[in-house]
Image: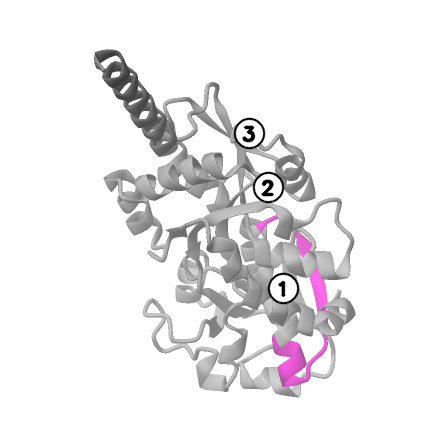
Amino acid sequence: MRATGFIVSALTALVMLASGARAQGWQPTRPIEIVVPFTPGSLADRNMRAVAPLLSRELGVPVAVQNIPGGNGYNRIFRAAPDGQTIGYGDPVAQIALAIVQPQPFDAMKLTWLGHFSAGVQTMVASARGRVASLDALRTMRQPVRCGTFGGISTGAAQCALLGAQFGFPVAFVSVQGPPELVLAAVRGDVDVASLGPTLWRDHIAAGAVRPLLSWSGQRDPRLPELPSLADIDMANLADVTVIRGVAAPPELPAAIRDRLIAALNAAMTKPEWDEFVTRSRLERDWTFSAEYPQTLARAQALLQQNAATLRGAF
């Protein structure tokens, strides 16, 4: 009986050890690479460079950021081994829109989306040197409105195309390298309209170089409370087509690795260093990381698919 009791105790201990191992989850054994498919200095780049040391602390290995702008960056994430050693930044809405009008070597919706730092409110502006004097003036435009984009079709460009379909003005895309270059294009008058996060426009609005037109959100942005929102022009149903500052891993990532990365990202969001970065950058505080996150992208995907003809025509 003593022998039987010893065996039972040993088996119980093994079960407890196994449960503890499952609770602890996957642990990386070598440095993690974060791929940023945007240029250095962009908000995407700054986001990931701010979070990298926090993830390193949580996961116990070095975390390095590598900039690979454009489709090559997304393809690097997509083709990487699903072992947790490669993750990346991405805007799934922009990639869904781009795939509608131009075949891509990867499927953004097959990436393992872990969540987002924020679903950003974007501000649509008109260049003070352009033809667009106000939001209402867009309704009267019959010549193509030059809308700035980058990376093929940016989320802001998709917004411009959707607004054109609603207001009845044609759109012609003008492509630049990235968000900083788009700001300069609007200031110079190389584009008529552009849509980016409000912090990128703040100084140029104050200087009168660009005219704020619209907050692409279901409600007014407290940073620009006088600016109309989509709800003010009866277009709140388009609010899901917004920039998403997301984090993705390769397709078919095992659940244990996914959950460990999600836990590390959630922990990073609670650190004072991250709070200081968000405060300094004046970003939204609507971060979310969860296994169910991919379901939240379905509405945006459906809206873009419904407007596929508009996007193809504008592109």
Of residues 169 and 104, the one nearer the viewer is: 104
Q: Position of residue 281 (x, y in %)?
A: 35, 50
Q: What kind of residue is marked 3?
A: Asp
Mark 1 crowdedness (10 Å alpha carbons): few <14, some 14-19, many ≥20: many
Residue tagged by mark 1? 157
Residue tagged by mark 2? 37
Tag shown at residue 83:
3
Q: In the displayed structure, would residue 35 be above or below residue 146?
A: above
First of labels 2, 1 by sequence position = 2
Q: Which residues are magenta?
A: 163-178
Of residues 123 and 133, the one nearer the viewer is: 123
First of labels 3, 1 by sequence position = 3
Residue mark closest to the camera, 2 vs 3: 3
Q: Give the residue at x 61% y 41%.
A: 251
The residue furthest top is 3
Q: CA distance from mark 2 to mark 3?
A: 20 Å
Q: Give the residue at x 65% y 35%.
A: 76
Mark 1 secondary-structure assignment:
helix
Please tell me in which quadrant of the rendered image residue 12 appears.
Answer: top left
Q: Magenta stretch containing residue 174, yes or no?
A: yes
Q: In the displayed structure, would residue 269 be above or below residue 288?
A: above
Mark 2 crowdedness (10 Å alpha carbons): few <14, some 14-19, many ≥20: many
